[in-house]
Image: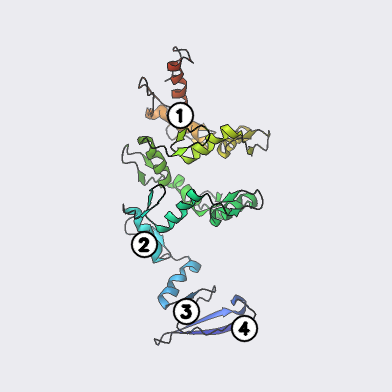
Amino acid sequence: MHQEIGLHETSTSVVVNKTISRSSVEHRDTKPTVKYVGKYKCDVCPRVCRSKSELEEHYGIHTGEKNFKCDICLKTFNFKYSLVRHSYIHTETRSFKCKVCLKTFKHKLNLKKHSIIHTGDRSFKCEVCLKAFIRKSCLMLHSKIHTGEKNFKCDVCSKTFIRSSQLRAHYVNHTGEKHFKCDVCLKTFYKKTYLVKHSKIHTEERNFKCDVCLKTFKYKSTLVQHSMIHTGERNYKCDFCLKTFKRKYDLAEHCTIHTEEKNFKCDVCLKTFRCKSHLVTHSKIHTGERNFKCDICLKTFKSKSHLVSHSKIHTGERNSNVMFV
């Protein structure tokens, strides 16, 4: 059974008629009023809009239409304000500054989210594992780890993901597109976050300090990993052999020993590897890339582990006859 609802704008002659099912009307203690003077109500959800154009724009949520396109990168959006926010990516304007660390942001919302880092407020707690989060959205995403919910599927390989951002990032594996380029070494990346992380190689910036030993790090993730040296915490356990690990990534890498999966293939010689890190190290054989330099003798190496081993020559911990290529 359907109920016809007429929505009227008194200041104009426009009349918008929408047909909705009775079940879509939210029942309250009193019977809802179905006449909205001077407002437009969505016939799908309870949202009420101030104008006809706003209502039409709102419908994009339900239809999936994205009518607002960026002139620079051609990305499309449901709403005009989303396009406006996105456009800042292509500019250098960063008008919002953190009063604590002076870091600047392009959006006020990003500054607000960032400021929570300094307060340490984690009000949203997971009922399963009791892990606490700064934002409700982070808790909701985390909860899917426990439910196994993966609603975003790749159209190419059918792999599923918890977040739409993970799916978008995954797509570049099929397209090979790398839109983000380092201004210093011209290396390109799939994601902006990878470029931001990479750019710190070219600077001496180390903003993350260990409270125990005062050692500093370029990345927060590296500090978190380091802190486990002091706590001995190993929260990630292998379901096959029950071995525990400090990092989720180390566990995932370890599990390939049991599954014998080799999902990382070299584009040059087609050799396959269990771990992405092994592939990255191997690829330098073809590129000749040597990004790790000894501060004492300026000798360069293909991997950090080779540099660490080499540095022991200068401290007397290793025989100088040991060679690395």
Q: Nearer the viewer, residue 11 or 131?
A: 131
Secondary structure beneath label 2: helix
Identified by mark 1, the residue type is: His
Question: Given contact means CB atoms under 8 Å apart, are the residues at marks 4 and 2 in contact?
Answer: no
Q: Could you tell me residue 323's position as x and y percent? A: 44, 16
Determine which residue is flagged by label 3.
40
For the residues labelled 3 and 4, the Cα–Cα distance comes to 19 Å
For the residues labelled 3 and 1, the Cα–Cα distance comes to 60 Å
Secondary structure beneath label 3: strand
Secondary structure beneath label 1: helix
Looking at the image, tell me whether mark 1 or mark 4 is earlier in sequence order: 4
Q: Nearer the viewer, residue 212 or 25?
A: 212
| Residue 31 - label | 4
Q: Is residue 64 left or right of residue 233?
A: left
Identified by mark 2, the residue type is: Val
Judge whether 110 appears above or below 199 on screen: below
| Residue 84 - label | 2
Q: In this view, does 98 lie to the left or right of 93?
A: right
For the residues labelled 1 and 2, the Cα–Cα distance comes to 42 Å
Determine which residue is flagged by label 1.
282
Picture residue at 46% right of the left edge, 70% below the top: 58
Looking at the image, tell me whether mark 3 or mark 1 is earlier in sequence order: 3
Nearest to the eye among marks 1 and 4: give it: 4
Q: In which quarter of the image is residue 50?
A: bottom left
Q: Could you tell me residue 143's position as x and y percent? A: 61, 53
Q: Nearer the viewer, residue 159 or 179?
A: 179
Q: Could you tell me residue 59's position as x and y percent? A: 47, 71
Instruction: Report crowding for label 3: few under 14, some 14 to 19, many 20 or more residues within 10 A (C-alpha).
Output: many
Looking at the image, tell me whether mark 4 or mark 2 is earlier in sequence order: 4
